[in-house]
Image: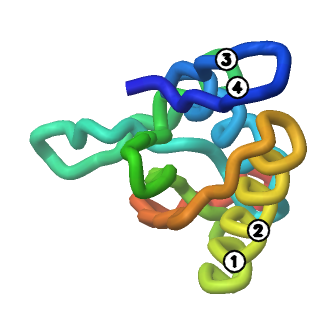
C-alpha cells in the first residue's frame, strides 16, 4: 500500500520500496554499521551481508492508515556500543525520511542480526 500525500496541486503516491531504499541508504551512512542483513535467515542461522548495491533489502516497511513503520535488519561492527549504533540509525532514518519525503515515521525497529570483526585486525 503506497503512502499518499495530498497537496494543493494534487496527490503524490510513494511506494514502500522507495521508503525502504531511502531508509537503507540513511542507515548505511551511520558509524558502527557494517551492513544490512537479509530478512531471510539461512538454515545455519548465518546472516547474509548485503552491500551498498541494494540497500532496501535489509529494510521492511509497513504503511497503513495509522502511520509508517520501518524495520531495519543490521549488522554492527565489533567493539561498538550496539545501543548507541541503534539509536543513531533510528534518528538518522527518521530525519532522512522526514526531510526527503515529508512523512512522519511512527516506529523504527532495529533488529541486530550479527556482529562483524573488521578485516584490519
Number of numbered discs visible in the structure rendering: 4
Give whichever of 96, 6 is nearer the camera: 6
Comparing marks 4 and 2, which lies closer to the viewer?
Answer: 2
Against 4, is 73 above or below?
A: below
Q: Is residue 28 visible?
A: no
Name the spot of residue 15 as percent of width and height, x first. 53, 20
The correct choice, above or below, for 54 with respect to 82 in the image is above
- Please rate how many residues cluster around mark 2, counting C-alpha atoms within 10 Å: few if below 14, some from 14 to 19, many from 20: few
Which residue corresponds to the image point at 57% horizontal and 28% vertical from the top-left? 4
Q: Where in the figure is residue 67, as x and y percent of width and height?
A: 48, 54
Looking at marks 1 and 3 on the same chain, the residue that comes earlier in the sequence is marked by 3
- Tell me, what colour scheme is on the image? rainbow
| N-terminal-most mark, 3 or 4 | 3
Task: Quote the CA–CA distance across marks 2 and 1.
Answer: 6 Å
100 relative position to 2: left or right: right
Helix or strand or loop: what does disc 3 sit on?
strand
Give the quadrant of residue 5. Answer: top right
Question: Circle 3 sits on which residue?
Answer: 11
Instruction: Name the residue tied to disc 4.
Output: 52
Ranked by sequence position, the earlier of labels 4 and 1 is 4
First in sequence: mark 4 or mark 2? 4
Seen at 38% across and 37% down, the residue is: 38
Whether tag 2 and tag 1 are in contact, CB under 8 A, the answer is yes
Element marked by disc 4:
loop
Which residue is the site of mark 2?
91
User: Helix, strand or loop at disc 1?
Assistant: helix
**Residue 51 image offset from top left, x and y in percent:** 63, 28
Amino acid at each position: 500500500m503506497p503512502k499518499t500525500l495530498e497537496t494543493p496541486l494534487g496527490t503524490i503516491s510513494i511506494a514502500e520500496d522507495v521508503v525502504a531504499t531511502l531508509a537503507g541508504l540513511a542507515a548505511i551512512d551511520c558509524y558502527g554499521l557494517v551492513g544490512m542483513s537479509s530478512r531471510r535467515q539461512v538454515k545455519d542461522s548465518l546472516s547474509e551481508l548485503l552491500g551498498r548495491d541494494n540497500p532496501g533489502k535489509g529494510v521492511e516497511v509497513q504503511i497503513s492508515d495509522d502511520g509508517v513503520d520501518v524495520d531495519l535488519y543490521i549488522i554492527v561492527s565489533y567493539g561498538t556500543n550496539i545501543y548507541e549504533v541503534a539509536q543513531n540509525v533510528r534518528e538518522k532514518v527518521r530525519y532522512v525520511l522526514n526531510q526527503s519525503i515529508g512523512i512522519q515515521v511512527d516506529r523504527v525497529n532495529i533488529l541486530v542480526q550479527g556482529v562483524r570483526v573488521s578485516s584490519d585486525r
